[in-house]
Image (cartoon, helix red, strand yellow):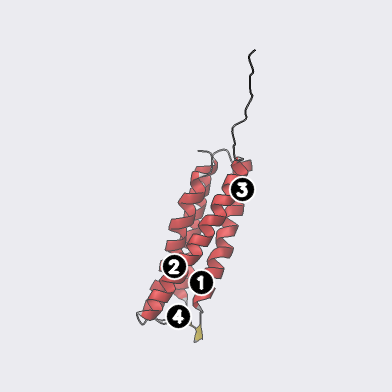
């Protein structure tokens, strides 16, 4: 007597994997930007912009919010773009460069501006590649 078992491999939907990866990347980027801000502050760099202090946790919160916007963008591109990965990378690199503009013109010292820009680049370096890997080429 022969028995045949049919098994279905455990697969993760592309959308689910994209969202999960995006959430993990957002958490990692938030932690990284808070660490960069804390180290910068400990090294004597002011976190004041226009005489108002930015709390270290503020870096993490804003990083999480904008990372999740990026994940939403990736989800939309995965559905509607012809080449989602390429479109996502190009779009997010341009958005990252544009995100540096407010830092450049901020009412803050040069060290503070550089620290703000560094946090944007750190977040982008974590989120963009992680999410892009989950998109179709």
Q: Earlier in the sequence, mark 3 or mark 2?
A: 3
Q: CA distance from mark 4 to mark 3?
A: 34 Å
| Residue pictured at 62% horizontal, 28% vertical | 7
**Mark 1 highlights which residue?**
59
Q: Earlier in the sequence, mark 2 or mark 4?
A: 4
Q: CA distance from mark 2 to mark 4?
A: 12 Å
Q: Earlier in the sequence, mark 4 or mark 1?
A: 4
Which mark, by number, is residue 116? none
Question: Which one is in front, 6 or 136?
Answer: 6
Q: Secondary structure at mark 3?
A: helix
Q: Secondary structure at mark 1?
A: helix
Q: Position of residue 119 (x, y in %)?
A: 44, 67
Q: Quadrant of residue 108?
A: bottom left
Q: CA distance from mark 3 to mark 2?
A: 24 Å
| Residue pictured at 46% horizontal, 61% vertical | 123
Which quadrant: the N terminus?
A: top right
Q: Position of residue 10 (x, y in %)?
A: 59, 36
Which mark, by number, is residue 47? 4
Q: Are marks 1 and 3 in contact (CB under 8 Å)?
A: no
Q: Earlier in the sequence, mark 1 or mark 2?
A: 1
**Mark 3 highlights which residue?**
75
Q: Are marks 1 and 2 in contact (CB under 8 Å)?
A: yes
Q: Position of residue 109 (x, y in %)?
A: 40, 81
Q: CA distance from mark 1 to mark 2?
A: 8 Å
Res. 77 visible in picture: no
- In the picture, measured across the screen, residue 96 lies left or right of residue 65, that is left
Q: CA distance from mark 1 to mark 3?
A: 24 Å
| Residue pictured at 49% horizontal, 55% vertical | 127
Q: Secondary structure at mark 2?
A: helix
- In the picture, measured across the screen, residue 93 lies left or right of residue 15, that is left
């Amino acid at each position: 007597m022969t028995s045949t078992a049919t098994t279905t491999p455990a697969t993760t939907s592309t959308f689910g994997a994209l969202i999960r990866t995006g959430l993990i990347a957002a958490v990692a980027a938030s932690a990284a930007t808070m660490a960069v801000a804390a180290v910068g502050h400990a090294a004597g760099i002011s976190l004041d912009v226009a005489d108002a202090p930015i709390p270290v946790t503020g870096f993490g919160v804003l990083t999480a919010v904008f990372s999740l916007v990026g994940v939403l963008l990736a989800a939309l591109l995965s559905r509607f773009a012809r080449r989602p990965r390429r479109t996502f990378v190009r779009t997010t690199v341009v958005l990252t460069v544009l995100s540096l503009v407010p830092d450049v013109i901020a009412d803050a010292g040069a060290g503070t501006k550089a620290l703000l820009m560094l946090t944007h680049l750190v977040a982008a370096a974590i989120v963009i590649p992680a999410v892009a890997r989950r998109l179709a080429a």
